[in-house]
Image: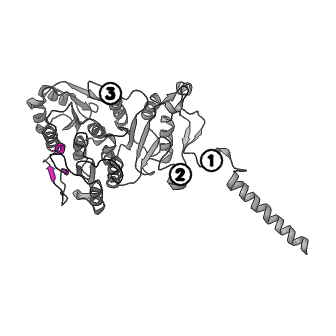
């Protein structure tokens, strides 16, 4: 019958119209489930607090995991890959800009050498770190080194590559090898090299435990920012190599800052440092996460980030993955000059970190386009730091009206 065919056609047209209305004009969609947003907030206002802040687990082109309004993720589970990504982010040599004068290569499992070598990342040397599996650059690492194309300069002693610790020098490059029989000796070799290249003592010595990477990694980020020299100590005994650097007459006025609480570096060790050199001051903290925040807030002379107001850059890395923090030290030598914050969980932002970020949350009174902003690099894939934790960070640093910030 003709009417039956017309009825079927009408039904099909209605189905097609409903499809178009849903997918192209958002008719019937739940406004709270818009997947274009990087953050979904429940129970609280824009300033965060203790409400549930959750992110979307997936999305087009990997967003929001890849980035949100205020965060950028360097994804990956291997610190070697992360180091290559960070170096290329800091020195995007495929476009306009200058390549690094040199590149520093560290064994991917040698966190002590990595922390000490970070001062070579700072200007005027400017040598970002690449991590080498078992001390030898992979094929991809060699390709990354070629892309970075270090040319050497007077500030690097015309060296194109520094190797720190037990590392095989890559062929085809002028290499300066820095090594020793212990972490303290390796750190002393880096200190001597930097002094020779800059022809000046450092502004400060940063002394950390050679046995506690979770308290030492913030020193790497600060050294990459400042060029201050990192030296090692035991809990109760300061190694001779460290004392020899401090006792050098060229360093007699260099202040000493010790990172970590007394159960990591004891008062006995502080007395040895005080006897050997200039003033000694501890930057403590009850745990690694709070100790990192202490350094971010700290200021004494030229030492310390002193980030106590809005508008800064940060790196968020896992406490139990020290090589991740070392891998991204190049991000602290320019751009937003990112300071290190630590999280001990893949799912939950530590309260001390969230409280700090909310305390320095940027705000505006009338015109947000004229305001200052904060930015956070998230280090590792979402199995290391989840999208939910990333969403919490994004919310904590989001620019907000001043009255909203005051309420938080």
Q: Give the side of residue 15 with respect to residue 207, left or right.
A: right
Q: Quadrant of the image for the N terminus?
A: bottom right
Give the number of callouts.
3
Q: Give the side of residue 383 with respect to residue 217, left or right.
A: right
Q: Which residues are magenta?
A: 154-178
Q: Nearer the viewer, residue 284 or 165?
A: 165
Label 2 – label 1 distance at C-alpha: 13 Å
| Above or below, 179 relative to 192 | below
Residue at the outermost left position: 249
Q: Nearer the viewer, residue 245 or 351?
A: 245
For mark 1, give the secondary structure.
loop
Q: Is residue 83 magenta?
A: no
| Residue position marked by numbered label 1 in the rendering | 34
| Residue position marked by numbered label 2 in the rendering | 57
Label 3 – label 1 distance at C-alpha: 41 Å
| Residue position marked by numbered label 3 in the rendering | 298
Q: Residue at x 44, y 35 (%)?
A: 374
Where does the image place residue 330, in percent across and percent down from the top left?
Answer: 31, 44
For mark 2, give the secondary structure.
loop
The image quarter in which residue 45 lies:
top right
Q: What colouring method underlies this structural image?
A: one colour
């Amino acid at each position: 019958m003709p009417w039956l065919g017309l009825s079927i056609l009408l039904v099909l047209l209605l189905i097609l119209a409903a499809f178009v209305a849903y997918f192209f004009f958002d008719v019937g969609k739940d406004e709270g489930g818009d997947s274009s947003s990087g953050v979904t907030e429940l129970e609280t206002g824009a300033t965060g607090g203790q409400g549930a802040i959750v992110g979307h687990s997936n999305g087009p082109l990997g967003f929001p995991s890849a980035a949100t309004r205020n965060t950028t993720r360097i994804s990956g589970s291997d610190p070697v890959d992360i180091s290559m990504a960070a170096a290329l982010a800091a020195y995007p040599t495929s476009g306009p800009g200058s390549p690094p004068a040199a590149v520093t290569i560290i064994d991917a499992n040698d966190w002590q050498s990595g922390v000490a070598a970070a001062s070579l990342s700072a200007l005027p040397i400017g040598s970002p770190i690449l991590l080498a599996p078992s001390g030898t650059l992979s094929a991809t690492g060699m390709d990354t080194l070629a892309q970075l194309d270090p040319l050497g300069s007077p500030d690097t002693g015309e060296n194109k590559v520094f190797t720190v610790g037990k590392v095989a020098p890559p062929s085809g490059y002028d290499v300066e090898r820095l090594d020793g029989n212990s972490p303290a000796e390796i750190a002393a070799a880096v200190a001597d090299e930097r002094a020779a290249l800059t022809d000046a003592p450092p502004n400060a010595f940063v002394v950390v435990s050679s046995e506690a990477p979770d308290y030492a990694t913030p020193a790497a980020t600060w050294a990459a920012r400042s060029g201050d020299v990192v030296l090692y100590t035991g809990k109760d005994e300061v190694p001779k190599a460290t004392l020899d650097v401090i006792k050098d007459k060229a360093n007699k006025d260099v202040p000493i800052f010790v990172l970590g609480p007394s159960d990591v570096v004891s008062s006995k060790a502080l007395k040895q440092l005080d006897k050997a050199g200039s003033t000694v001051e501890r930057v403590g903290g009850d745990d690694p996460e709070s100790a990192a925040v202490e350094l971010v807030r700290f200021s004494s002379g030229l030492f310390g980030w002193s980030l106590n107001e809005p508008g800064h850059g940060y790196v968020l890395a896992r406490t139990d993955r020290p090589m991740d923090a070392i891998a991204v030290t190049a991000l602290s030598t320019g751009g937003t000059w990112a300071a290190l914050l630590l999280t001990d969980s893949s799912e939950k932002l530590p309260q001390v970190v969230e409280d700090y970020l909310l305390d320095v949350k940027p705000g505006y009174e009338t015109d947000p386009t004229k305001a200052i902003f904060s930015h956070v690099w998230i280090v590792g894939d979402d199995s290391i730091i989840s999208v939910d934790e990333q969403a919490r960070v994004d919310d904590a640093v989001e620019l907000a009206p001043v009255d909203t910030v005051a309420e938080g």
